[in-house]
Image (cartoon, rainbow, N blue to C red):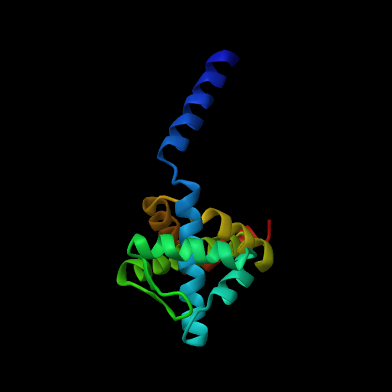
Amino acid sequence: MTLKKNTKRLESIKAAHQSEKTDFSTRMEDYLEIISELVELKGYATTLDISRYMHVSAPSVTKMLQRLDENGFLEYEKYHGINLTQKGNQIADTIRQKHGIVLEFFEILGVGFETANRDAEGIEHHLNPKTIKQLRKFITFLKSNPKILDNFKNL
């Protein structure tokens, strides 16, 4: 019985990793999200700003910016501004929305903001759009039923 359960679990893990995004795309999403936030905050993003927020060296940022440029996610010229393309903005917006939904869900669960934000940052890249949609629906349901929410908070 245990062997069958372990085999099933192994197959489940294998299937999840086959459909999982590569590390590059998770990193890419992080970069696009940071660039988008910086542009919204300051009107522009620099390699130095990105390296500070990502905790990576400036040369690493430059390499990734070149890759993102080659893949059509941004327009990058060394020593000039960094602009996200429509394709890059779409991904950044999607990640921002996912982050917000997961963060709100964790806060409803009673997880403190700092922990919720850190956890949301790790999870946002790996959730299926269907899962996000259902989370959004569940949050809306809970908010429209404050009695249920209060009962949960008083557990």
What is the residue that sits farthest to the front in this orientation?
78
**96 to the left or right of 6:** left
List x then y, in percent, for residue 110: 65, 62
Vertically, is 36 above or below 112?
below
Residue 61 visible, this angle: yes
**In this orientation, which residue lies closer to the viewer: 112 or 141?**
112
**Residue 78 pos. (x, y %):** 46, 74
Q: Position of residue 36 (x, y in %)?
A: 46, 74
Q: Quadrant of residue 72?
A: bottom left
Picture mark count: 0
Task: Give the residue drawn at x 45%, y 81%.
Answer: 80
Judge whether 82 appears above or below 141 on screen: below
Residue 143 visible, this orientation:
no
Q: Nearer the viewer, residue 100 or 57?
A: 57
At x 42%, y 67%, the residue is 92
Q: Is residue 38 above or below residue 126?
A: below
Residue 33 rendering spot, x and y as whole percentages: 48, 68
Residue 94, located in which quarter of the rendered image?
bottom left
**Residue at left 59%, top 75%?**
48
Q: Which of the image's four quarters has the C terminus?
A: bottom right
Q: Quadrant of the N terminus?
A: top right
Give the residue at the far bottom of this rendering: 43
